Amino acid sequence: MGSRISAEECIYHIKSVAFMLYADRRAYATPHARGESEFWEKATLCRDFYLGAFVYPPYREPFYPRRFLGPGARVLSIDYVQEGGRQRPLGMLVRVDDPSHIK
């Protein structure tokens, strides 16, 4: 994580306290929103997001907020888990440099 996110930057995660302790980076709870505009009105602190393959109330979709990140989102890294002899994504670090697609 340290090579991808500097110590001065922050990250959104749906379990921000646990993530902050694990990654040793400032983390905030991912804004919960019903629509893209509402999401970006709330997501003003960080440009990095860690999207997990799990659901955790009130976030009811895996990889939340993937559908709000838009075409400016870049996947910086993906974490995998071995399950039944297969590799499946556990989470991904995504950066949005410019959410200018939001009107």
Image (tube, rainbow, N blue to C red):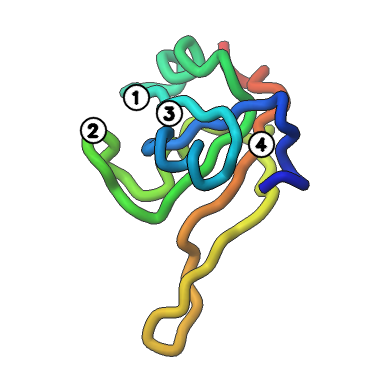
Label 1 Cα crowd, 10 Å radius (few <14 / some 14-19 / many 20+): some
Instruction: Report x, y in % for residue 83.
Output: 40, 80
Q: Residue at x 57, y 11 (%)?
A: 103
Question: Tag on residue 95?
Answer: 4
How many numbered circles are shown? Answer: 4
Which residue lies under the disc numbered 3? 30
Which residue lies under the disc numbered 2? 58
Are discs 1 and 3 less than 8 Å apart at CB? Answer: yes
Instruction: Report x, y in % for residue 21.
Output: 49, 40
Q: Is residue 78 left or right of residue 22?
A: right
Mark 3: amino acid: Thr
Q: Residue at x 47, y 25 (%)?
A: 28
Are discs 1 and 2 less than 8 Å apart at CB? Answer: yes
Instruction: Report x, y in % for residue 16.
Output: 43, 34
Instruction: Report x, y in % for residue 52.
Output: 43, 50
Q: Taking 62 as reference, is 42 above or below it? A: above
Disc nearer the start of the sequence (4/2): 2
| Distance of label 4 from label 2 (alpha carbons) | 23 Å
Disc nearer the start of the sequence (3/2): 3
| Distance of label 1 from label 2 (alpha carbons) | 7 Å
Mark 4: amino acid: Arg
